[in-house]
Image (cartoon, helix red, strand yellow):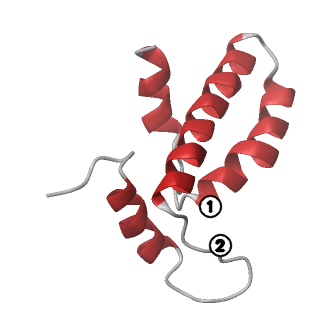
């Protein structure tokens, strides 16, 4: 059975797959408390990103994605959270 996307256990599974090779840029495994805090930050960042897109700020949204969302996704071992957080955004 697969763990829910937002669970700490799912993060650990993703981390092991996403960062299977040791090397430069590999972030340390987050504690559960750090994971929860950063996951919530990523959720809020996607809300901001979608608001920028809806507001016609595509260039600013692209910059925001590259400088805020992408580094958080890498730290959380998420290849692309857009689909997960789009659904999240629509339900808020």
Q: Residue at image x 42%, y 60%?
A: 11
The residue most toward the left is 1
Judge left or right: residue 30 versus residue 32: right
Q: Residue at image x 69%, y 27%?
A: 49
Circle 2 SS class: loop
Q: Residue at image x 49%, y 83%?
A: 20
Q: Distance between the residues labelled 1 and 2?
A: 6 Å
* Marking on residue 75: 1
Residues at discs 1 and 2 in contact (Cβ within 8 Å): yes
Work out which quarter of the rendered image holds the N terminus and state it.
bottom left
Q: Which of 14 and 9 is in front in this view?
A: 9
The residue most toward the front is 33
x and y percent of residue 52 in the render?
75, 19
Instruction: Give whichever of discs 1 and 2 has the lower sequence position.
Output: 2
Q: Quadrant of residue 61?
A: top right
Per the image, the residue denoted by label 2 is 27
Circle 1 SS class: helix
x and y percent of residue 7 in the render?
35, 50
The residue most toward the top is 55
x and y percent of residue 64 in the render?
80, 37
**Height in image: 23 above or below 41?**
below
**Height in image: 67 above or below 53?**
below
């Amino acid at each position: 059975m697969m763990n829910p996307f937002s669970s700490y256990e799912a993060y650990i599974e993703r981390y092991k797959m996403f960062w299977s090779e040791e090397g430069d840029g590999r972030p340390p495994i987050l504690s559960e408390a750090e994971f929860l805090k950063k996951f919530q930050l990523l959720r809020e960042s996607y809300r901001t990103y979608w608001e920028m897109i809806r507001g016609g700020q595509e260039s600013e949204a692209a910059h925001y994605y590259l400088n805020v969302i992408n580094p958080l996704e890498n730290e959380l071992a998420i290849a692309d959270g857009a689909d997960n957080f789009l659904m999240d955004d629509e339900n808020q």
